[in-house]
Image (tube, grey):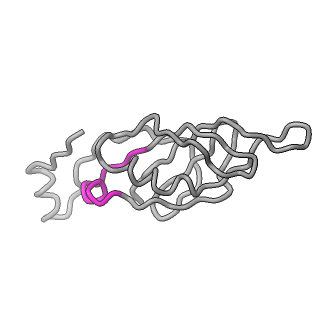
Amino acid sequence: MRVVVGAIGMLCMFVGCSPPQYAVAPTPQPGIVINGASYPALERGRKPKTVVPPQYPDEAFHKQIEGFVDFEFTIQPDGSVADPKVTKEFPEHQGFAKNAEKVFGQFTFAPDVVNGVPVATPAQYRMAFKMH
């Protein structure tokens, strides 16, 4: 996705009108917002117990581009994240996946419990990057 401000956008910067609006990724379900990054709930209503906010990619921030990264992973019995894999980054090549991968392994979640014992649990998570 390429964002071009154009003459109207430049004029707006000088005279104070609203710049043009750009299409962004669909907004995921509402969740926790920390330092400009939104952390929506997992499928089945799960939310992370521990969240480490990623750094917003510099270029995307300056271009005012929002995006998201989808992960598939396993919640270990102790709540830690194992085998995280990025399944989608939108938009691609803006640095969202790179920055999300740096911190996602530090998240913790509540695992499923079977017969009173925590078990490894396959899961998915969408980490959204939103401008606020």
Q: Residue at x 78, y 40 (%)?
A: 119
Along the line of sight, which residue is nearer the eye, 13 or 126? 126
Q: Residue at x 46, y 59 (%)?
A: 54
- In the shown orientation, is residue 1 left or right of residue 113? left
Along the line of sight, which residue is nearer the eye, 121 or 1? 121
Residue 131 location (% of width, % of height)? 39, 56
Give the number of marks: 0
Q: Is residue 29 magenta?
A: no
Q: Considering the image in quadrants, where does the N terminus appear?
A: top left
Residue 47 location (% of width, % of height)? 66, 49
Q: Is residue 66 magenta?
A: yes
Instruction: State which region is magenta.
Output: 57-68
- In this picture, is 113 found above or below 5? above
Along the line of sight, which residue is nearer the eye, 35 or 58? 58
- In the shown orientation, is residue 42 left or right of residue 54? right
Q: Residue at x 62, y 48 (%)?
A: 81
Q: Residue reaching furthest left?
A: 7
Q: Residue reaching furthest right?
A: 115
- In the shown orientation, is residue 33 left or right of residue 75? left
Residue 26 location (% of width, % of height)? 43, 38
- In this picture, is 14 found above or below 37? below
Q: Residue at x 71, y 38 (%)?
A: 121
Residue 65 location (% of width, % of height)? 31, 50
Q: Residue reaching furthest front?
A: 83
Q: Considering the image in quadrants, where does the C terminus appear?
A: bottom left
